[in-house]
Image (spheres, rainbow, N blue to C red):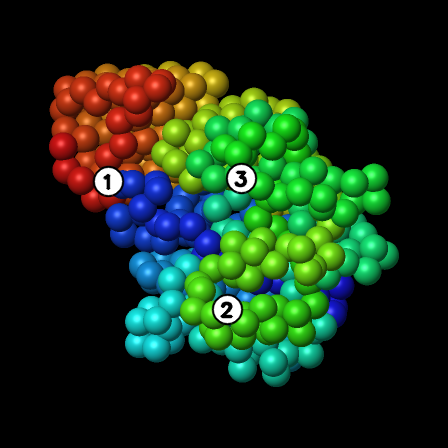
Amino acid sequence: MRDVMGVININIRDDVLDELTFSRCISSVHFGGHYRLIDFILSSMVNSGIQHAAVFTLQKYRSLVDHLGTGKEWDLNLNSKDEGLSVLHPNLFHSLKYFQGDLQNFYSNMDFFKRSRQKNVLIAGSNMVCNLDFRELVDFHRRSKADITFLYRENDPLLDVSLWRRRLVIGEDGRILSLEPSEKGVDSKQVLLEIFVMSKTLLIDLVENCVINGTGDLLHDGIIKNSNSLKLFAFPAKGYLGVINSPALYYKHSMNLLNPSIRKELFSQPGLIYTKDKDLPPTKYMRSAEVTGSLLASGCSIEGRVENSILFRETRVEKGAYIKDSIILPKCQIAEGAQIEHAIIGKGVSISMRKEIKGRKDNLSVIADRTIM
């Protein structure tokens, strides 16, 4: 896999997560008590043997850059100029003026791709929670002599509720016979994932053709519109996988982690998920604390009651406070007597005494970072 470069692409608008991305890009949204969304794809690439990963940025990327650092947590702080972690910024002055979609990322960094020694690129979005082994995908791509090979899922109800999806019709040899939006009525249970591999030469050609034609999205304009002239193949993805493109899906996949079997599958099979270590002390449980069916990160202080919830690091829950079916992001202060139910509470939020925040399972209450209530 040393001849494969991993590319984590910004291919979704930050605003689909509403208050969760007021101050950060979707790649750096917190997940699972201790992680960020980007950790899952990046860890999957590293565990698959990829030694050079490029991460695109676009807007609100300060927290993402801080989280990635030198890449040492993913063993990507290598000394070779052809390996390690590269964070790529688009030339906004030139790109955004003329192009839309993710083309601005690729076109702004064409020189980076042309100079790299890797012959192939594996491109993935940054808004998926998964634990994937890409080696089988790359091996299948080479054996089939495909131009582009996609990952896909079949009969996956977790993807059926996604905002964007395309149905596939796949031949016995794995070749894609039909690729259409699901609203067009394609009778198939096979769903395209925005994870695909191709040669670096083909990537450069597709990007340059998009520039010539004045289009701006690599997947839709560069690949799908040219599907008749390209050999497109598909390979099934294995294991737990969730696409996070709405607060409801963020909540759903987060709460799924309270199931021990899902948690084990996502975080340890086929490899571990790595993240930036905050090096905090264990959570402190006072005599009055009552915690059931929940996940609590390090550095918390609990005096109140927590039920069926996920609490991130350095959150304080005072005596008499009650949290149920909720997600509390880092460094929150939940004062005495406060009640929170079916809610997502942003980073650094302060909830005052006896304040009630109650949403519903089908209508969550989402509080933006650093709000005082």
Which quarter of the image is occupied by the C terminus?
A: top left
For the residue pair 354 and 216, the one nearer the viewer reads as 216
Residue 181 tag number:
3
Q: What residue does disc 2 label? A: 210
Identify which residue is drawn at 44% across, 63% down.
216
Distance from Cα at disc 3 to Cα at disc 1:
33 Å
Local SS, label 2? helix
Q: Is residue 314 left or right of residue 259?
A: left
Identify which residue is drawn at 56% across, 56% down.
225
Identify which residue is drawn at 85% across, 56% down.
143
Q: Position of residue 102 (x, y in %)?
A: 45, 61
Q: Earlier in the sequence, mark 3 or mark 2?
A: 3
Q: Is residue 258 above or below residue 175?
A: above
Residue 368 tag number:
1
Identified by mark 3, the residue type is: Pro
Identify which residue is drawn at 18% across, 31% down.
351
Q: Is residue 284 visible?
A: no
Q: Position of residue 340 (x, y in %)?
A: 26, 21
Quadrant housing residue 314: top left
Distance from Cα at disc 2 to Cα at disc 1:
37 Å
Q: Position of residue 186 (x, y in %)?
A: 60, 32
Q: Are marks 2 and 1 in contact (CB under 8 Å)?
A: no
